[in-house]
Image (tube, grey):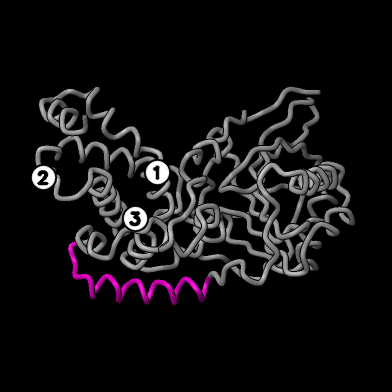
Amino acid sequence: MTADLISRARTGDGDAFRELTEPYRRELQVHCYRMLGSFQDAEDALQDTLLSAWQGLAGFQGRSSLRTWLYRIATNRCLKALRSASRRPAMEWNIPGAEPPEPTRLGEVVWLEPYPDALLEGVIDVPPGPEARYEQTESISLAFVTALQALPPRQLAVLILRDVLEFPAKEVADMLETTVESANSALKRARAGLQRRWPGAADREPPPASGSPAEEAIVAKFVSAYESADLDALLALLTDDVFMSMLPMPLEYEGRDVVARFCAGMFGSGRRLDLVPTRANGQPAFGVYLSTSTGIRHGTGLFALTLTGDRICAMTRFDRGVLPWFGLPRSLPSR
């Protein structure tokens, strides 16, 4: 069947090419997202990958599987993008009527974008193999993808291909046109670099299962506290070392006290918000809508929560431009 499709695709049969590549399309997009940290850049890299595969199908000799060949193209497209990218600049504070407290630090990775869970079906629910170092849900989390972006591009590629996707060392070396020894050396350095920036969840309670009553209970409490501007109720949900970021603004806050000051300023500004549930990066998320004097509620951004046990250990806010990716409108009608 595959040989017949390849033969037909080589003669210019677009339908045959789509049938060949469609089973890998979603996982290739997720791969590009892990490498680039940007949903938009991942989609661009995917389109470049498919175009390159279509144009280069005559050169596919079958020495590797079609999947491996596509990953080779996608990985090298992403490496090219990383080498030539001028990352989007940080955004200035743009919330009128509220002044943020002094941040704990300024983040380096401000271009990170969320990935809709609706596009992860069939990709992250596959059980990891014996060689995988990370659970699939863990390897798409915001904290993990953020830490990946701090790695040098080649180390980043090797770590994802080996420790997340479990490609053999020889195949990874071939993809990157290097030796097995060089690829293994890059992997060792990548693991050490990732460990420094992302120690993982070993010291934390695991989050409740997606869609479980335990998760729904935390989410309901968060929505109630945030929509009613109940600071005490919100703080009761946070861990002592809770982390908050405001992408693409570089402001980062760590610790319940400083996050409390930030939220107090937001609540004190008189802004009233409605939250519309969705999911991003395997985590609970919400479209955030600001009530106006006209009654229309305008989208201001998207919140994603990271849970541990029955608490929230991280909150990440993204700009409103991401709302359409989640099927959320830019505004809601008046009540």
52 over 78 or under it: above or below: above
The amino acid type, in three-letter code, at marker 3 is Ala
Q: Earlier in the sequence, mark 3 or mark 1?
A: 1
Left or right of residue 173: residue 236: right
Q: Residues within 10 Å of mark 1 (few under 14, many from 20)?
A: some
- Report the span colored magenta: 177-197
Q: Which of labels 2 and 1 is toward the front?
A: 2
Q: Which residue is mark 2?
A: 61
**Can you give x and y, in whole percent of width and height, for residue 108 in the image?**
51, 65
Q: Which residue is mark 3?
A: 85
Q: Which residue is mark 1?
A: 27
Task: Determine which quarter of the picture holds residue 216.
Answer: top right
For mark 1, give the secondary structure. helix
59 over 251 or under it: above or below: above
Query: Gap between marks 3 and 1, in whole Å?
Result: 23 Å
Query: Gap between marks 2 and 1, in whole Å?
Result: 23 Å
In the picture, the quarter occupied by the C terminus is top right
Q: Is residue 195 magenta?
A: yes
What's the residue at 70%, 26% (across, down)? Answer: 332
What's the residue at 20%, 40% (across, down)? Answer: 52
Q: Is residue 91 visible?
A: no
The amino acid type, in three-letter code, at marker 2 is Gln
Task: Determine which quarter of the picture holds residue 327.
Answer: top right
153 over 274 or under it: above or below: below
Query: Gap between marks 2 and 3, in whole Å?
Result: 32 Å
232 over 220 or under it: above or below: below
Q: Looking at the image, which is closer to me, 137 or 101?
A: 137
Q: Residues within 10 Å of mark 2 (few under 14, many from 20)?
A: few
Dominant secondary structure, magenta: helix
**Can you give x and y, in whole percent of width and height, for residue 103 in the image?**
67, 67
Q: Is residue 125 visible?
A: yes
What's the residue at 51%, 38% (across, down)? Answer: 121
